[in-house]
Image (tube, rainbow, N blue to C red):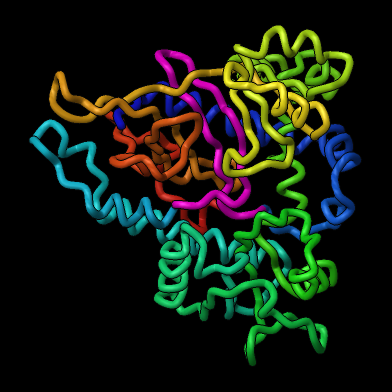
Amino acid sequence: MFVSESHLSRMAAVVRAVEYVVGLPGYREEVLARSPEIARHDPGGARSAFFGFDFHLAGDRIGLIEINTNAGGALLNVVLARAQRACCPPIEPLVPTNADAEAFENGIVAMFRNEWQASGKTAPLGTIAIVDANPEQQYLYPEFLLFRSLFERRGIHATVTSPGALQWREGRLWHDESVVDLVYNRLTDFALEGDDVSALREAYLARAVVLTPHPQAHALYADKRNLALLTDRDRLAELGVPEATSEILLENIPKTETVRADATERLWSRRRQLFFKPAAGFGSRAAYRGDKLTQRAWQDILSGNYVAQEIVRPGERAIGPEGAAQVLKFDLRAYVYAGAVQWTAARLYQGQTTNFRTPGGGFAPVYSGERIPEMGTVTEEHFR
C-alpha cells in the first residue's frame, strides 16, 4: 500500500489528540463511571501495550473507525517487512530494511520492559506469559510463537498458555513451577469476568502481576461509546479540550452516537449512512452496515448496547494486470504505545469488514516517500 506522508502525519496527530483527551480527569471520570468495576482498579503504572488505531482512507479523507487494546499482527508485519523485495530501483528507498524490522522488535521488547518498570518493579523482567483462551486454536497462534521466540532471544523466559493454566498461590501468579512477572493479555474477556480467568483476576487486583493491556485501558480507549464523546463538540469543550485538538478529532473521526430509544426513528431513516457496532465488540462481530440491515438485526441493535457511526468508506487497491485486476478494500492499522505510532500496516479484504479470509488479502506493508518521526525507532530512551 502506498500512503502519503501527509496522511500518515494526520493519523499520528489523531493518536496524539486522543491521548490528550484520555489524560483529562473529566474524561476519565465520566468513562470509568460507566465501566465495569475492575476498570476502576489502578493498574499501577502500566500504560498497556499494542493499541491498534484503525483508519479508513478514501481519497483525501481519513477516518478513525475504532481503537483496539490488544491489536494483533505486529510481529507478523515484522516477518512481512523482512520478506519485501523492491521490484525496481525507484521502490528501493521505500522498502523496509532488516534494520527497520530489528528496530521495531527492539522497540517491542523495550515497551514490555517499560510496562514492567513503570509498575514500580526494580528487578529485571524475568517471565512473560502470553495468554489467550485456547491459544493453539487461535487464528493468530503463529504470532504468539513469534512473541515467545522474540522474548526468549532477549533473555526473558516466555510461555504461551490459556488463563485456566495459571494458578494464584502464595501471593504470586504461577504457570507450572514458574512465577509469572508479566502477562501479555490477548484475551477478549476485557473485564476478566470468566471463571477461567479467576487466578489472573486475583493476581491483577493484588498487583502481584503486571497485566498489559489491562481492563482500564480497554475502558478508556476501546469502548466504542468513547467515540461518541470524542466526536461531540460541546462535550469536548466542557472537558476543556483546546479547540485545535477538538478540530483534529472532529475532522478525522466519523461522527458517532450511542443508539438510544428516543433516536430510533431518526437512526432508522439514516441507516444507509451508518455503521452499527456493539460498544464492547471486537473483530467486527455483531456489527452491521446500515444498508444491509434486516428488521431482526435492527431489533438486536435496539435491545443491545450499540453505537451508530457515520460511514467512511474504505479505500481500494487494484492488484493484478489491467482488465483482470482484483479489487480489494483496505484499512490502515497504526500500532501505538505511549501516544506514539510504532508501525503502520494495511489490511486488505473483500466484504463488509476485514476478515483475513479473502484470497490475496491480509496484511500488506505501507510504503511512504519518507518515514515520519512518529514511525521512527522506538527505544527505551523514548520512554524516559
Expressed as whole percent of the image width and height from the top left, the position of residue 325 reads 20, 25
In x, y percent, where is residue 120? Answer: 73, 68
Question: Which region shows up in magenta?
Answer: 48-73
Apparent side of residue 66 relative to residue 5 in the rendered image (left or right):
right
Left or right, 147 with respect to 305, comes to left
- The residue most toward the bottom is 177
User: With respect to residue 156, does 329 lie above or below?
Assistant: above
Q: Is residue 14 left or right of residue 4?
A: right
Q: Report the residue at 56% width, 51% height from top.
A: 50
Q: Is residue 330 found inside the magenta-colored segment of the image?
A: no
- Counting from the top left corner in percent of width and height, residue 382 is at 52, 51
Which quadrant is home to the C terminus? bottom right
Question: What secondary structure do most residues of the magenta stretch adopt?
Answer: strand
Q: Is residue 243 above or below residue 193?
A: above
Residue 185 higher or lower than 348, as above or below: below
Task: Count how many numbered circles sit on residues in the image.
Answer: 0
**Residue 287, horizontal then vertical, whole percent:** 63, 33
Residue 292 vs 131, above or below: the answer is above
In the image, 64: left or right of 181?
Answer: left
Q: Is residue 267 or residue 21 the one in the foreground?
A: 267
- Residue 70 magenta-highlighted: yes
Q: Quadrant of residue 311?
A: top right
Query: In the image shown, does 104 or 159 lie closer to the viewer?
Result: 159
Extreme residue in the left direction: 89
The N terminus lies in quadrant: top left
The residue under the point 70% across, 72% down is: 121
Q: Quadrant of residue 321?
A: top left
